[in-house]
Image: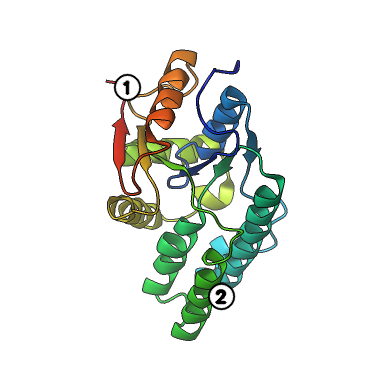
Amino acid sequence: MNSIPHKLSSRSLITLAGTVGAGKSTLTRTLAEALQFTPAFEKVDGNPYLEDYYADFKKWSFHLQMYFLAERFKQQKAMHEEGLGYVQDRSIYEDVGIFAKLQYDQGNMSDRDFDTYQSLFEAMVMNPYFPKPDVLVYINGSFDSIMRRIQSRGRQMEIDTPVSFWEDLYTRYETWIESFTECPVLHLDIDSYDCSDPESVKEIVHALEELQNAPAGRHLLLNGS
């Protein structure tokens, strides 16, 4: 992807959000190249808990969420200190608002563990190392499209996970984004928008420019129509 001239601040933080399989990593890489920003990916390879988590949610949910929270803090600290423009794959807000809450609601995390996790999260987001994103890009599509992507990328632990888990996660994302007000939000519909097409990426960049100084809580839908 060639770079695209833009008016975003050179220190902008563009954070991507969306359910598993929505295409966050691909768009993170594409936008970082287009904006000449640095991509910041979620650490999945080498995660010591991920396979155990999918095999036994009840036993490993708290451990996995604490691991992700620690990694997110280290990543955020490094971005803050470098002072560069970043495109970030997944937000910390999803960790607590969706994934940890899902496991707690399903009885896979105790009251004590969930309270401890929330307390640490709240302390982290009050830290100056956690500036809010300039724009949150929320990627979504139909549930069938999401499931096709999960199947096509071939991670066996995801393929073996019951469909009911993905349905619950999908619904939680839909509910979560409706009330998200930490920063402006750009909605991107994967069913009607080609993120690999240069003209489509230009439209995304223009939408980011429009939102960069918008009030927190403003939502803009970009669906390729």
As helix, strand or loop, the secondary structure at mark 2 comes to helix
> Which residue is at the far bottom?
112
Distance between the Cα atoms at labels 2 and 1? 42 Å
Q: Amino acid at mark 1?
A: Gly
Residue 221 visible in rendering: yes
Residue 85 picture location, percent across and down:
61, 37
User: Image point 65% across, 51% down: which residue?
Assistant: 80
Q: Position of residue 179 (x, y in %)?
A: 29, 55
Q: Where's the N terminus, which quadrant?
A: top right
Q: Earlier in the sequence, mark 2 or mark 1?
A: 2
Residue 106 visible in this rendered orientation of the protein: no
* Pick the front one: 147 or 215: 215
Residue receiving disc 2 = 59
Neighbor class of circle 2 (other Cα within 10 Å; few <14, some 14-19, many 20+) is few
Q: Quadrant of residue 140?
A: top left
* Residue 16 percent across, percent down from the top left: 48, 42
Residue beneath disc 1? 224
Q: Quadrant of the C terminus?
A: top left
Up the image or down, 107 lies above or below 206; here it is below
Residue at the spot 52% in from the left edge and 67% down from the top edge = 126
Q: Residue 47 — which label?
A: none
